[in-house]
Amino acid sequence: MSTFFYMLLAFVVGVLVGWFIWGRLRGELDSLRGDLDRARSERDRFRADTDRLSGELDTCVRARADLERQLRGTPAKAGADKAAAPAPTALMSSTPAAAKSPPAKSSAAKSASTKSVPAKKPAAAKTATAPKASAAPRKAAPAPKKAAAPTAPNGKADNLRRLIGIGPVNEKLLKDQGVTTYAQIAAWTEADVKRVEEVLNFDGRIEREKWIEQAKLLAAGDEAEFARRFPTAGTASNT
């Protein structure tokens, strides 16, 4: 009887130990499955980031090629514009007058003319030289004032790379267009967006990534709302 009791007790203890071991193994198996799912999601996210970066790289290459073509065509165009530019008003007004004025007589000619004229007619000589004095060239008209060159926006330039979608290349292209502050981007109109997208070779990306909304929040200094609405941008440089 005692042997049967011990055997039954050993069986019960074995079942309990096996159940405990199986429960722990099952928990670890579930944990490993969760880790595998997270690793797969990270892999998919990395693939998406890789595709996005590849697209940005292609855009940058095209933008660089366009800029190189523009830079190669700029010197020839500038030379043609300079050659076709009209002469200043001052030169155009003074040149004909100088051409019309008679050449100055030499001292020998003056002395010969004074010897040939009788001494009794000084008044006639004065009247003859009076019209020559009136033929002097008129005063040249003042040169037209140059139009004031556009000035850069007042204040310190902002870190445009904080906006989602603006990397080092896009920031450089925007600065080449004179865009250096959040306030400028926040004030863009539809025409401005179209012009910038033509320069950057974008197609609706500014609206998709909400550049103007981000710039309005940063220009107003609303960091909390910016961090809430655009958590992926953070507060550091958006590279």
Image (cartoon, rainbow, N blue to C red):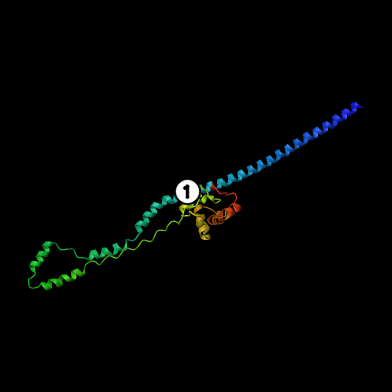
Nearest the camera: 232 or 121? 232
**In the drawing, does residue 61 fall left or right of residue 44?**
left
User: Which residue corresponds to the image point at 70% horizontal and 41% vertical from the top-left?
Assistant: 34
Which residue is drawn at the image coordinates 54% and 50% (left, top)? Answer: 162
Please tell me which residue lies in front, 40 or 186.
Answer: 186
Q: Nearer the viewer, residue 5 or 103?
A: 5
Q: In this view, does 163 lie to the left or right of 133?
A: right
Residue 143 higher or lower than 127, as above or below? above
Question: Based on the displayed image, in which of its 4 quarters is residue 97 positioned?
Answer: bottom left
Vertical order, 57 against 151 (above or below): above
Return the x and y of residue 1 as percentages of the image width and height.
92, 27
Residue 93: name its quadrant: bottom left
Q: How far from the left and from the top, in percent, is residue 151? A: 42, 57
Q: Residue at x 83, y 33 (%)?
A: 15
What type is the residue that disc 1 sits on? Ala
The percent position of residue 210, horizontal first and vertical second, equals 57, 55
- Residue that carries the numbered disc 1 in the rendered image: 65
Exactly how many numbered labels are in the figure?
1
